[in-house]
Amino acid sequence: MLDLQRIENDLIEKLLHCQSMHGLNQVKSFFLGKKSEIAEGLKAIPQINPEDRKDYAKNLNITKQKIENLIKLHAQTLEENQIANHLRHERLDVTLFEAHPKGSAHLISTAIYDVVKIMQSMGFVYQENVEIETIFNNFTGLNIPENHPARAEQDTFYTTDGRVLRTHTSSVQVHVMQEQQPPIRIVCPGRVFRNDQDRTHSPMFHQLECLCIDTHVNMSMLLQTIRELFRAFFGKEIPIRLRPNYFPFTEPSAEVDIQFEGKWLEVLGCGMVHPNVFKMNGIPEHYRGFAFGVGIDRLVMLRHGINDLREIFENHPGFLEQFRG
Ligand code: PHE
């Protein structure tokens, strides 16, 4: 007769030491395979004498069932352990990233973002734009005559295919007037290029253009818009003054200075859109418009007390880290 209890105990003993699926398969074939004691026992049923046969077969089947269940359970446990192990090893330690310095937006990007947001709050719409322009969009369409000094090579970068790196964001005014119908209110930041370099000039710098065209636009609206822009940008009332100036594309034209720590500093050019510009770019005569172009780099220098423009563009980490947001 088979000692079923002993078989069960043997199995439990084996399972306690079985840590892998491979091992478990071996255990399974040892206890349930063709040559296992259980299989032999089942084969022997016909030889058992009839009074004992029923009980014998029943007990044997119960044990076989138990063995199968125990093995199945152990397989499940092994699988769960394997998954848990995987998860433990693959866990993403988010605190590790602390070891790397965090980046932040550049001073220029932050200033552009701030100014655009302020202008949007006054109903201006962000305008896409391009940096390489046709001569028409950069000069002619803005009423800048053929012989104007700004067109000369010492001031302007020309491309070999007869275009220019835009010298101001005003070129976007031409795009907008040709492509949109009034009322128009756009804000357009971007890089501009001039053949010029010293402590306060860089061959590449940033401007932000605003253009407003409607039937009732006037100079006092222009002034109020500029005032509000500086108040919101610097977080306090900023004294401003206008100096009459000349731009071919505005009439009248002015330059705007802001008072900062007792000094007057030029930050912006502006004016009422010149009728020739409307005429050349398909805006009907009864409309009025104002436009201004503000120097973003200058605003950044004032905001952060930076004296040398070049520091903003050289991107030394030690310099930039002081302003991390
Ligand atoms: N484009 C001018 C400049 O670069 C600024 C300006 C913009 C003036 C819009 C008037 C109107 O200096």
Image: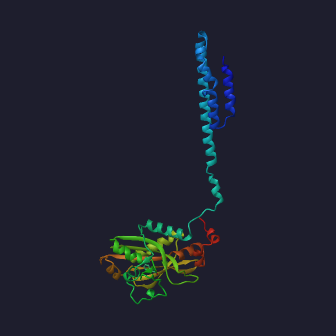
Q: Is residue 76 left or right of residue 141?
A: right
- Image color mode: rainbow
Q: Position of residue 265 (x, y in %)?
A: 54, 80
Q: Quadrant of residue 325?
A: bottom right
- Disc tally is 0
Q: Quadrant of the N terminus?
A: top right
Q: Position of residue 120 (x, y in %)?
A: 44, 66
State which quadrant residue 46 falls in. Answer: top right
> To which quarter of the image does residue 150 belong?
bottom left
Across and down, in percent, residue 319 comes to 63, 72
Q: Residue at 64% across / 29% down in the picture?
A: 30
Which is more toward the observer, 112 or 310? 310
Viewer can see residue 235:
no
Asked if residue 170 is positioned above or below residue 155 in the image, the reply reads above
Quarter of the rendered image showing ligand 1: bottom left
Placement of 78 over or under 216, stated as above or below: above
Compared with 59, 306 (above or below) is below
State the residue in front, 238 or 84: 84
In the rendered image, residue 16, in percent from the top left (x then y), is placed at: 69, 32
Identify whether 295 is placed above or below 50.
below
* Horizontal relation, residue 39 to residue 288: left or right: right
Q: Residue at x 45, y 85 (%)?
A: 245
Most distant residue in the bottom direction? 147
Say whether residue 315 is left or right of residue 229: right
